[in-house]
Amino acid sequence: MAPGAAPAAQLAFLALLGTLLPGPGGARTSIHPSKAIIPRGGSLRVNCSISCDQKATFGLETELTKKVVSHGNNWKVFELSDVQEDINLLCYSNCRNEQTIATMNLTVYWIPERVELPPLPLWQPVDEDLNLSCLVYGGAPRDHLSVVLLRGEEELGRQPVGKGEPAEVMFTVQPRREDHSTNFSCRSELDLRSQGLELFQNTSAPRKLQTYVLPSTKPHLEAPRVVEAGSRWPVKCTLDGLFPASDAEVYLVLGDQKLESNLTYNGDSVSAEAWLEENEEGTHSLNCSVKLGEKDRRTHSNVTIYSFPVPTLTLSPPEVSEWTTVTVECVTRDGAVVMLNGVSAEPPGPRAQVKLNVSADDHGSNFSCSAALKIAGQVVHKNQTRELHVLYGPRLDQRDCLGNWTWQEGSEQTLKCEARGNPIPKLNCSRKGDGASLPIGDLRPVKWEVAGTYLCRATSARGEVTREVVLNVLHGQNIPGIVIPVVAVALILGALSTAGYIYNYQRKIQIYELQKARKAQEEAALKLHAQSTPP
């Protein structure tokens, strides 16, 4: 049989026979080395020999490129080159027309061309399973090839590389918060240390993982339900329990208008605040969306924009003379109800009216009108006030100006005398006899010369009133006249105390005498006091 012509199955069978049975006369074929491992594309020298006592024919059966580099009577050395894959070599020989064979196993190794970790999700929820695949391109022998999944430098798992090109190796991990912004990578390991070689490693480019936590709760939206058109009002949206909160995005939208927001981050919380101003009446949808990773949480509420002017409060006429009838009326928009001076309209509605017969005491009185309108389940209020002006003549009585003043000479005093009226009257006080003016409203030392009787006159366009004012000034010589009665009274009180003491000890014997003495003392004291008091 010509070399290389036998089918593979036949060669394998012959190889088995060659390892079991010697040839005629004990001839045996051998191959050296019996097994080998070389890098892909490498070369190898193989020695085929036969133990035969006569000339024999022998050769190396292979599809590889080969050449004889040395030979002898019963041996040949073949050089194999550009070996690309694993192969079984067969060395055959004929001795006395009997064929024997020997085989060897040639293993080719090659480091994977590359190992790759495909792109990771842009965002990965914390504690949810994440399936990662490591792709290995090339590499042999596969039974010595494995893949390691790395988190940073930490080994998370190791698996053998199976068939396929590229071979795909799957890993499942549960990312944690602390894995945020951590690099993951795949490392291939071709371990040929058991074959007398070394450990060959190749690592993929790292991929950064971004983890996040987005709670299932909705954001908390703080916004008024009812807002007056043209007013400026705040809106705030908050969501807690985020990670990393600083990467969260918050959107506030009124209707189809995106609002300019100010974001605030605090730990695991994010807040967005905006100021709104809307003039279009009606109910508008206010939406808040918090986005983190590839998911978002939404909430919304309705905001009703309303227009509600202040009620119209009229006094007719606005300025009247006393004892005149005034009509007070309050009017608001349809759908609202009014209260006039705290009293609801009868029946409840947008109009209330009251008529008053006013007096001078009503001057400066305030009338208030409160209008209430129910909007979207809430009641809003608007108020208006007006002041009533009553025209009346001058008033100058005891409460405005005392009729009798008594001052000590040299003391500092202020004479208070003020006329009332609308319009405000002019007041003039002059002393009878010489027409000297009375110093009103000034704090000044009291002089003896200001004493006298004054006539005060209050005048306005609505009339005139007068009032006499007597100003008494106590001269310096009157001081002893005041002190003496005081001393006398003190002496009398002391005598009364003594009489009481005697009364307790002498009892009924001196009752009559003591009563008589006390009565005499009281009469003397009263007489003395009357003499010392100025008219």
Image (cartoon, rainbow, N blue to C red):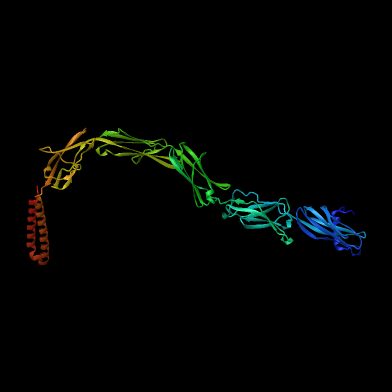
Q: Is residue 169 left or right of residue 417?
A: right
Q: Relative to residue 250, is residue 459 depicted above or below?
A: above
Q: Quadrant of residue 32?
A: bottom right
Q: Is residue 35 left or right of residue 128?
A: right
How many numbered discs sit on the rendered protein? 0
Q: Residue furthest bottom?
A: 505
**49 and 368: which one is in front?**
49
**Is residue 268 at all visible to an observer of this figure?**
yes
Q: Position of residue 446 (x, y in %)?
A: 14, 45
Quarter placement of the N terminus: bottom right
**Is residue 322 at all visible to an observer of this figure?**
no
**444 and 384: which one is in front?**
444
Q: Relative to residue 427, is residue 183 depicted above or below?
A: below
Q: Position of residue 33 (x, y in %)?
A: 80, 60
Q: Quadrant of residue 171?
A: bottom right
**520 and 245: which one is in front?**
245
Q: Residue furthest right?
A: 96
Q: Quadrant of residue 495?
A: bottom left
Q: Position of residue 267 (x, y in %)?
A: 50, 52
Q: Is residue 221 left or right of residue 441?
A: right
Q: Position of residue 255 (x, y in %)?
A: 51, 39
Q: Is residue 289 left or right of residue 18?
A: left
